[in-house]
Amino acid sequence: MATSDFWQKVSSSVSAPEWSAGTTAPGHQYAGGTSRLWMFLDVVTVLLAAILSTLFYFGIGPIVGVKEFWHGTLIEGRSMGLLLALLGGFIVALILISRQLHLYTPARLNGFLHEQRLTLQACFTAGLLLTGTIYVIQATNIPRSIVFITLGLVLVAQSIRRLTYRMLLYRRYEHGMGTRNVLIVGTGPEAHALRHHLESIRHLGYTFKGFIDLPGSRSRFATSSGDVVGSLGSLFECARQQFVDEIFFTMPCERGMVQEVLEKARANCIDLRVVPDMYDGLAWNSPIEYIGQFPTIPLHTGRVPEVELMFKRLLDIVFSTAALAMLSPVLLAIAIAIKLDSKGPVFYASERIGKKARVFKCLKFRTMVQDAENRRAEIMHMNERDGVLFKISNDPRITKVGTLLRKYSLDELPQFFNVLKGHMSVVGPRPPIASEVREYKLSHLRRLDVTPGITGLWQVQGRQDPSFDSYVSLDVAYIENWSIWLDIKIILRTVAVVFAGTGT
């Protein structure tokens, strides 16, 4: 199951609402940090293009080129300061024009051809400013070939970079990763049109989770329909259950009602958009953003550190690849030992609940007898954890090799393959099983707002604490205080825990 359909089956069993205005759920809107990253890449692109075009024109190596540039002899009669000023002016102009053309906004808000046209426009306009400046200052000794080759390389590099990023983004959307869950307030024609628009244009990266019925609305949709998931009074409870990132208003409401929803959306970091019609001045200062061809007005957009999350993903890939490469002899030895110790497969793949309640297969080395799941009911009375968790120190189903693997957490090494697939991260809350999530209260779903991990704060700080509340509080503390440095510290502490052999 690539989507969160699992939640449809268990939402009815979730305990009474425990939604509070102080509980936050991370948004996924384009952050200022991401815009700064794209600007930085533009700077790097221009510098590399200028260097390559200059070296190509003069037919010299990079070392000689740097020496001549530093001594001001690369281009006769022109100092290094002037050349840097021209290059810097071009970079500033390119960034400002790109920003004005909204090239640093989410890729899903612009079509591919439109984005490529804007890229051409930005490069062409900034290039005109550069060539115009060179003409005005009469810098006739600056080779025009270098200027035109630089502009051409910048255009090609930006176009390819944006196309590559978009293709990778679309591929993630196809696998149900990185998409944004939405609720639509209203059940009228506009609401149905918006739903059809979001579902028909898959590259927008939106997943429709249901309609919210408004009191007194004349709807063609029966409130008993499965697509109507709640009323305005239960809007944020439904948003929590469905892991919603954005809410769309598609029909007019009283100003006070929309203002109240807006305040709650801000408190809970859920983006709020309205289909422009209305709202008596609430959105006068807000720009219109097109979701595909559908105009919307953003009343609130959340912020998430996307640059840091990119580095987290990079860290996951590098660390997992290195771990699997270095530990491959150990993995082979463990596989042979498991086969010799007991009957059954080497790996055990269990269904786990990941980010936004998506179900995935979590890989582990098999540490129990082959019919362990069938025997679970027989030993439920031996459970040492309270509430939702199930844990037995001396579980009779564990094999001899399994005991050693669990002691040093070696049974979890195959989960690095899950990390490479993007289902898990190296550090994060542990992925629960479906039976545990069915027992969750609404506030416990906070754990599922982020990608689960192989290790986490609970594993290194509260592993022997049987309290489920402590388990959840440590996960929430990790989510709310997350940073790359915190991940690195948890990884280092995990290594110490593994060598100490405190696993069970």
Image: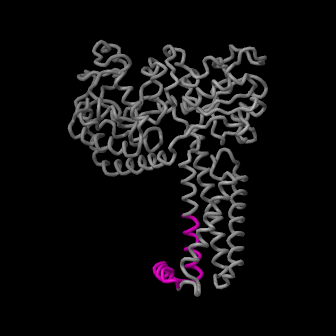
Query: Along the horizontal axis of the image, is 169 left or right of 114?
Result: left
Q: Quadrant of the C terminus?
A: top left
**Residues in magenta?**
44-72
Most extreme residue toward the left, as rendered? 500
Residue 338 location (% of width, % of height): 28, 35
Residue 291 shows up from this direction = no
- In percent of width and height, residue 51 lies at 55, 74
Coloring scheme used: one colour
Q: Is residue 460 visible?
A: yes
Which residue reaches farthest bottom?
76
Does the magenta run of residues contain 62?
yes
Q: How many marks?
A: 0
Q: Main secondary structure of the magenta part?
A: helix
Up/down of 85 relative to 303, above or below:
below
What residue sits 37% from the left and 43% below the top? 487
The quarter of the picture where residue 406 lies is: top left
481 left or right of 79 in image: left
Q: Is residue 35 on the magenta stretch?
A: no
Q: Position of residue 440 (x, y in %)?
A: 45, 19
Residue plotted at (50% across, 16% down): 14
- Which image quadrant: the N terminus? top right
> Percent x, y for residue 312?
44, 46
Specify whether 236 is left or right of 334: right
